[in-house]
């Protein structure tokens, strides 16, 4: 039963900005349960980040969370004594000498009006901060918040982050244009935020969670504290701060909120710096990881490939490390973004999670 639950979580974790599979499942209230995780040592700070889009907007069920489900999640965080930080604050927390605490970050992408109208009042009610990533070209248009609303949100404890100007599919641009355009759009968004809000964003979120090595380097040179990606997972002191994972959250995923909030990380020595790119010559790309085995129940380790079966090969490297290779049994085709996910329990019964995103730019 636990394996079935985890498989469901994996399938639901592929949410990307504006492109999410439809789900008919209705969110129900989160039930009280014993979900106390093992206490982390001061050297094991972990932060779970979530990403939302729309709030109380039934027109878009795949990217929407009801106000009831969202309030239940906020209350659960308060009742379970979570420290909730903005994205930038979480990075500073990891760098600080502050003792480890249960910590969560709530991020919202795109800046839809429904956040201002339905999500923000609940954050203010529970005195919980959040980080909002805006694509500045759409500010004030259609369903998007205007500058006055963004200013009010910032005054209410919401960190404003950079999500580029147009929120384009940059990997579909030619190499000769991609990096110039990407850098220019980041700068445009920074200038507009400063001109209209008096704020220079200190954190960034990749549109659709898509980027390559040069794009990552560009973000790093712009002075941001860190950048949010779209693969699910846990932020730790060992995480690359320019591809921080986030768990997607909408009505379809609401029941899994406590389990994800209490998820632990793996200790992986050679995490890829960018998502993998799928080429026509390689339809079943393998992913190899070097994992520290201390406390991990290797015999219970499972891999999942979104929409496909997978094979997991384990080779012992030393008494403390193994080399894992995850590979889909079927070709990855007809899907732009595919997650490879690894799960296992540790000796204390806590579940650990890692995922890696593959992108096929040829799929629109």
Image: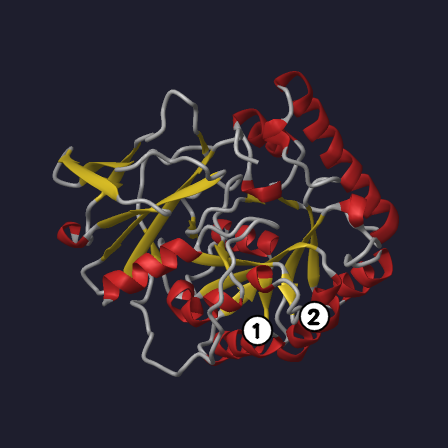
Q: In this view, does 298 lie above or below 178?
A: below
Q: In this view, does 153 lie above or below 358?
A: below
Q: In this view, does 216 lie to the left or right of 335?
A: right
| Residue at which label 1 appears | 70
Q: Residue at 31% of width from left, 60% of height from top?
A: 6
What is the tally of numbered marks visible in this picture?
A: 2
Mark 2 or 1, which is nearer the eye?
A: 1
Q: Residue at 44% of width from left, 51% of height from top?
A: 232
Residue at the limit of the structure toward the bottom, as seen here: 32
| Residue at which label 2 appears | 120
Check disc 2 and report its element: helix, strand or loop.
Answer: helix
Residue 257: x percent and y percent? Answer: 44, 68
Q: How far apart are marks 2 and 1 (CA)?
A: 11 Å
Residue 134: x percent and y percent? Answer: 72, 50
Check disc 1 and report its element: helix, strand or loop.
Answer: helix
- Tag on residue 7? none
Instruction: Give the quarter of the figure containing the N terminus.
Output: bottom left
Q: Residue at 74% of width from left, 34% of height from top?
A: 185
The answer, for residue 45, to whether it is visible in the render is no
Comparing 26 with 37, the one in front is 26
The answer, for residue 103, to whether it is visible in the render is yes
Q: How crowded is mark 2: few (under 14 residues within 10 Å), some or many (20 or more)?
A: many
């Amino acid at each position: 039963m636990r394996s079935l639950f985890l498989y469901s979580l994996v399938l639901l974790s592929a949410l990307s900005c504006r492109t999410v599979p439809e789900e008919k499942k209705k969110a129900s209230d989160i039930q009280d349960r014993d979900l106390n995780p093992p206490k982390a040592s001061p050297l094991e700070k972990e932060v779970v980040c979530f990403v939302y889009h729309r709030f109380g907007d039934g027109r878009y069920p795949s990217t929407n969370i009801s106000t009831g489900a969202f309030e239940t999640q906020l209350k659960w965080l308060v009742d379970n004594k979570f420290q909730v930080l903005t994205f930038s604050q979480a990075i500073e927390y990891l760098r600080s000498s502050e003792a480890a605490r249960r910590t969560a970050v709530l991020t919202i992408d795109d800046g839809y009006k429904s956040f201002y109208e339905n999500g923000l009042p609940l954050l203010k009610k529970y005195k919980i901060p959040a980080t909002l990533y805006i694509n500045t070209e759409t500010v004030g248009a259609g369903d998007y918040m205007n500058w006055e609303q963004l200013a009010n949100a910032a005054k209410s404890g919401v960190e404003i982050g950079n999500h580029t100007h147009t929120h384009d599919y940059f990997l579909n641009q030619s190499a000769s244009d991609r990096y110039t355009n990407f850098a220019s759009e980041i700068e445009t968004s920074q200038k507009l935020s400063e001109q209209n809000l008096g704020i220079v964003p200190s954190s960034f979120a990749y549109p659709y969670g898509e980027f390559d090595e040069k794009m990552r380097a560009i973000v790093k040179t712009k002075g941001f504290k860190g950048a949010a990606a779209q693969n699910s997972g846990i932020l730790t002191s060992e995480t690359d701060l320019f591809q921080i994972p986030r768990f997607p959250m909408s009505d379809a995923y609401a029941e899994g909120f406590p389990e994800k909030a209490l998820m632990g990380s793996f200790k992986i020595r050679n995490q890829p710096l960018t998502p993998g790119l799928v080429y026509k010559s390689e339809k079943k790309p393998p992913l190899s990881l070097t994992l520290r085995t201390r406390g991990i129940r290797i015999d219970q380790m499972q891999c999942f490939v979104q929409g496909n079966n997978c094979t997991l090969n384990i080779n012992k490297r030393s008494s403390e490390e193994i080399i894992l290779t995850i590979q889909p049994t079927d070709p990855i085709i007809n899907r732009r973004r595919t997650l490879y996910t690894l799960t296992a329990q540790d000796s204390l019964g806590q579940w650990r999670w890692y995922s890696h995103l593959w992108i096929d730019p040829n799929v629109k």
